[in-house]
Image (spheres, helix red, strand yellow):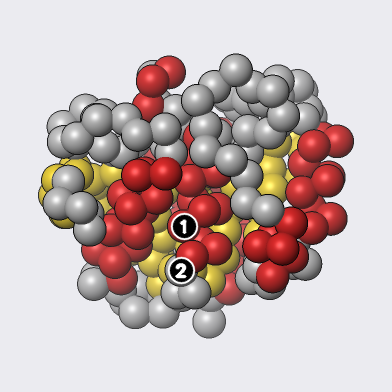
Amino acid sequence: MDALRFRTEDEVSLEGDLRLPDGPARGSAVLCHPHSRHGGSKDHPVLWAIRAELVGGGLAVLSFNFRGVGGSAGSFGGGRPEVRDVAAAVARVRAEADGPTILCGWSFGALVALLEAIADPTVAGLALVGLPLGDTGLQLPPLPGDAELRAFRRPVLLLSGQGDQFSQRPDLEAVARRLPNAELLVVPGTDHFFWRREDEVATAVAGLAERVLP
């Protein structure tokens, strides 16, 4: 695993970790972490499990810290500036590997990943883990509007824990109905944090990757 730094369009220096597969890369992925003001960072067992599974499947994977987290410069921006962070991460990982790029975000990172994917046609697929919906009490950017969601025809995985207090099934079903190519998966017996269920989350995200990889 290689530690690296890269810069956003607005000249914020971000820290990340890049892992490459043993053989030629089939594509690439970017992982986006939970809320910056609630302990979110690139270093969490859920994200480690997803990274390991995707690298094992032949992807180059970039995990990074949003602005204001860990060694990344800048300060928390409420979600909209963080879209630039994801765009910079996508550009950086695509410099390492040809082929499709998928985005995977967890919680706050899922919403920011969705915003970036809608704006970026180079994103081939999207895994949204614990997408925060409804009245969460968190500082979040707004969900994209109906027209933007209905126009997004690339594969999307919506994944949540059965007891997820921030990403409840009725709210997810409403979003899934607006996304033309969405799959909804609810993991029983767990909540927003997926303690000791990290491998199940990683397997599901790898399945999304297989839908878009050559």
Q: Is residue 8 left or right of residue 108?
A: left
Q: Amino acid at mark 2?
A: Asp
Residue 44 vs 145, above or below: the answer is above
Q: Amino acid at mark 1?
A: Glu
Marks 1/2 in contact by CB < 8 Å: the verdict is: yes
Quarter of the image where one finds residue 29: bottom left
Q: Which mark is residue 149?
A: none
Q: Is residue 58 left or right of residue 187?
A: left
- For label 1, the residue is 116
Query: Which residue shows up at 29% across the image and 44% down it?
Result: 64
Query: Which residue shows up at 63% across the image and 38% down it?
Result: 131
Query: Which residue shows up at 50% across the image and 25% down it?
Result: 139
From this viewpoint, is residue 91 visible? yes
- Whole-percent x, y for residue 178 in the image: 79, 58
SS class, disc 2: loop
Given residues 8 and 56, the one toward you in this image is 8
Quarter of the image where one finds residue 101: bottom left
How many other residues sit within 10 Å of disc 2, few (<14), some (14-19) or many (≥20)? few
- For label 2, the residue is 120
SS class, disc 1: helix
Given residues 73 and 186, the one toward you in this image is 73
Query: How far is disc 1 from disc 2 in space, using C-alphas?
Result: 6 Å
How many labels were placed on the picture?
Answer: 2
Residue 181 vs 187, above or below: the answer is below
- Whole-percent x, y for residue 112 in the image: 48, 46
Query: Which residue shows up at 66% across the image and 68% down it?
Result: 152
Given residues 137 and 156, the one toward you in this image is 137
Q: Is residue 109 left or right of residue 189?
A: left
Residue 134 vs 79, above or below: the answer is above
- Whole-percent x, y for residue 211 in the image: 63, 70
